[in-house]
Amino acid sequence: MRPQAGVDRLKPVPPMHPNDLPVVGQALSPANRIIPQLLTGKCYTPAMTLKSAAFFALIGMTLLTVLLAVGFIRDVSALSAGAIAAMTLLKSLIHLLASVSVAVFLFVFYKAQP
């Protein structure tokens, strides 16, 4: 089959001018609208303050810490029964300590907010 004339050729694009770049950047990134709103006090989500966001993160981290504590207790009882290796208990302990430290950080951060 014979190709049609002009179908496989690209059309030239007009050159971009330096004034076109901010328009392209604004079209690609919504941060150009959000960041000035945050800096001027006109918040993007006015119902979510920093204190309420810290409290929401603290609730989620507390639930995760409780879940990891239950898993650690399960691993301790499994180790005493000889069902798991000591390395599994060590891994569970490291996860629990990391979770507790992040929960303490979020609690202190929440209390520091006005």
Image (spheres, rainbow, N blue to C red):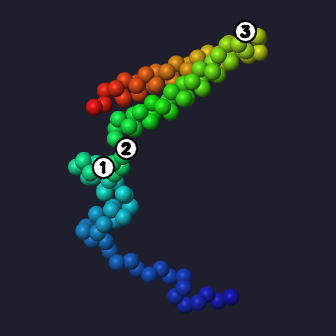
Q: Residues within 10 Å of mark 2 (few under 14, many from 20)?
A: few
Can you give x and y, in whole percent of width and height, for residue 96 in the image? 55, 20
Q: Nearer the viewer, mark 3 or mark 1?
A: 1
Of the image marks 3 and 1, the number of the one nearer the N terminus? 1
Residue beneath disc 3: 80
Residue 95 seen anywhere in this rendered image of the structure: no
Mark 3 residue type: Ser
Instruction: Tell me, yes or no, whether the two marked residues, 1 and 2, touch with CB atoms within 8 Å.
Output: yes
Residue 46 located left or right of residue 88:
left
Number of the label disc, if any, that sits on residue 19: none
Query: Considering the numbered disc 1 on the image, is that residue within a helix, a strand or a loop?
Result: loop
Instruction: Name the spot of residue 99 as percent of width and height, x first.
Output: 51, 24
What is the quadrant of the N terminus in the image?
Answer: bottom right
User: If the image is split into quadrants, where does the C terminus sit?
Assistant: top left
- Which of these two is toward me, 56 or 3? 56
Residue occupied by mark 2:
48
